[in-house]
Image (tube, helix red, strand yellow):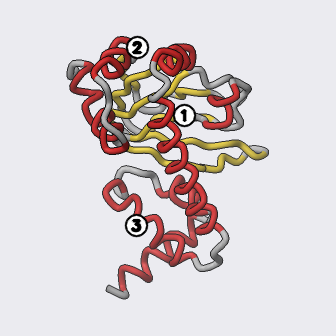
């Protein structure tokens, strides 16, 4: 496995692009993040549990989903260099309304909610970095909600291609269909039509 500094390097780059990151903050993050290997199929967070960790996905593929009746609805697909949490649960430390599952073998580095609060307290300026990341997250979620309001399956699938094309072969079709809120059969027909239209 890569060393922790190497695994966190992309995260530091993301943070530096927002605002230069003091060396002391980098040291604090390095000291508090812990690397972990996750096997495909592992549930990182179960619906109903409190999300007590933030994960930085150094390699692999994750999805979040919630369950309605016996049906799983995929709400997010997360790939390399994603910051992963169940937002409502993590921010409020209340039970999660979603689960997070590994769709492939993954390498993550994890930071506990308690340790993050300690870093905020020690370095108040770090709150700015995470505020910007949170704003970007909610903007992306708004884009997805707008996509879901579209009735055209082709428009939904084109949204997926624009955002996840590099991972198309790695994500099972049933999860893509669930993420786009269309039936697997509709997704199959849509892909076929778009392929013939090229």
**Residue 99 appears at what percent x and percent y?**
62, 35
Mark number for residue 85?
Answer: 1
Q: Quadrant of residue 79?
A: top left
Classify mark 1: residues with Cα within 10 Å, few (<14), some (14-19) or many (20+).
many
Mark number for residue 32?
Answer: 2
Decide: is 167 above or below 32. Answer: below
Q: Considering the numbered disc 3 on the image, is that residue within a helix, a strand or a loop?
A: helix
Q: Quadrant of residue 10?
A: top left
Q: What residue occupies the far right of the structure in this picture?
A: 69
Query: Nearest the camera: 91 or 155?
Result: 91
Q: Residue at x 67, y 23 (%)?
A: 50
Classify mark 2: residues with Cα within 10 Å, few (<14), some (14-19) or many (20+).
some
> What residue did someone put label 3 on?
161
Query: Nearest the camera: 14 or 94?
Result: 14
**Residue 78 appears at what percent x and percent y?**
45, 44
The nearer-to-camera label among 3 and 1 is 1
Mark toward the start of the polypeptide (3 vs 1): 1
Q: Residue at x 40, y 13 (%)?
A: 32
**Residue 154 appears at what percent x and percent y?**
51, 78
């Amino acid at each position: 496995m890569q060393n922790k500094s190497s695994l966190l390097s992309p995260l530091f780059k993301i943070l530096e692009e927002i605002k230069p990151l003091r060396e002391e903050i980098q040291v604090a993050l390095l000291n508090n993040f812990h690397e972990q290997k996750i096997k495909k199929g592992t549930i990182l967070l179960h619906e109903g549990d409190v999300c007590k960790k933030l994960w930085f996905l150094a390699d692999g593929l994750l999805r979040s989903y919630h369950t309605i009746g016996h049906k799983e609805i995929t709400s997010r697909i997360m790939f390399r260099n994603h910051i992963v949490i169940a937002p409502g649960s993590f921010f409020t430390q209340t039970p999660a309304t979603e689960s997070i599952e590994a769709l492939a073998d993954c390498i993550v580095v994890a930071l506990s909610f308690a340790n993050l609060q300690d870093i905020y307290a020690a370095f108040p300026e770090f709150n700015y970095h995470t505020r910007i990341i949170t704003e970007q997250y909610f903007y992306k979620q708004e884009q997805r909600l707008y996509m879901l309001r579209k009735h055209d399956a082709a428009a939904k699938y084109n949204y997926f291609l624009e955002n996840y094309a590099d991972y198309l072969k790695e994500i099972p079709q049933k999860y893509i269909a669930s993420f786009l809120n269309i039936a697997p059969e509709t997704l199959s027909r849509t892909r076929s039509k778009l392929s013939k239209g090229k």
